[in-house]
Amino acid sequence: MSLPAFQLLRPRTLDEAVALMTKHEGDVKIVAGGTDLLPSMKQKLFTPAYVLDLRGVGELRGIRKTAEHVEIGALTTLNVIEHSALVWKDYRVLYEAVKTVASPVLRNMGTLGGNICLDTRCLWYNQSLLWRKSCGFCLKKDGDLCHVAPGGSFCWATFSGDSAPALLCLNAELEIAGPSGVRRTPLSEFYVNDGIVRLHLASDEIVTRVYLPESSAGWKGSYLKLRVRGSIDYPLAGVAVALKVKSGLVEDARVAITAVNPAPHIVKDADAQLIGVEPSEEVADRIGELAARTAKPLTTSALTPEYRREMARIFAKRAVMACVN
């Protein structure tokens, strides 16, 4: 479980980082906090010749508020976001999600950009080289067989980031830098529902910033996750809910799920069930059913798909009621 040999690159500016990504395209991996990449490299899931360390690019850190949005640098640690009074007050669902990530030590290293770009996970993939070799390599790495759905050509490895569903509820946008310049894209268009492809991100591009619109500020928010242990673990099912409430009635609403599909998803029609009504147990039950219908878990973790789907339903209901209360 030692790290493979690689050359460490340490740019000091974003332009320098993009230039190095372009120069070594296809044979370089980005490291920010390293909490996801380095364990995967020890498992020999990645063996890049170059590792690009972004920590020296100071312009990618910090939380800034403007008239139109709140801007969060991709290198901003989860610990900084968790303890931001601005995030706690105006973007509560993000605070609720970030504080559940791993442990305080890991949140002190892990970054928002890294959490957004997490590799997908599977019981048959996130193992040592010896383990994978003994069981037979899988579709996602070195093999041509999916152990989760034998006979299929689709990878069901799940996306397991906690911040993404919260950011989807906030209608967040990403800034992405590449050799052609900077582009912005809605987070809802960033993910690909495929365990291998994962992201609409070119191999020479870098996620640089997250934008939270002013129109989503002040919404009530809740995030609940299923995991085996009370800390450290990735979610095995997660639900984020954000509600804009005025005079007891919901004016706008979004619900999103994670860790039960190859990508995080907005729960369709959840807003239609919530807008214009006073949330109740009955309404929350309907949101739970919609969340369970959106969830498509398979045997990618130690818990059964049936249990994870049922917990998505229960957590969606609880998250709605938590926002109300």
Image (cartoon, rainbow, N blue to C red):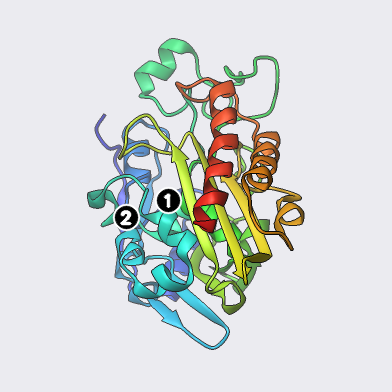
| Residue 158 drawn at (x, y percent) | 55, 35
Residue nearest the viewer, comparing 257 with 322: 322
Q: Secondary structure at mark 2?
A: loop
- Say which residue appears at 36% left-offset and 36% top-offset: 233
| Residue 211 drawn at (x, y percent) | 54, 72
Task: State the residue position of label 2.
Answer: 33
Residue 251 vs residue 302: left or right?
right
Q: Secondary structure at mark 1?
A: strand
| Residue 146 drawn at (x, y percent) | 60, 20
Q: Which mark is residue 29?
A: 1
Contact? badges 2 and 1 (CB < 8 Å): no
Q: Quadrant of residue 85?
A: bottom left
| Residue 155 drawn at (x, y percent) | 62, 30
Whether residue 298 appears in this view of the structure is yes
- Say which residue appears at 46% left-offset and 83% top-offset: 65
Whether residue 260 appears in this view of the structure is no
Residue nearest the viewer, comparing 71 with 142: 71
- Say which residue appears at 67% left-offset and 43% top-offset: 282
Residue 99 vs residue 173: left or right?
left
Q: Amino acid at mark 2?
A: Gly
Select label 2 or label 1 by which is in front. Answer: 2
The Cα atoms of the two marked residues, 2 and 1, are separated by 13 Å
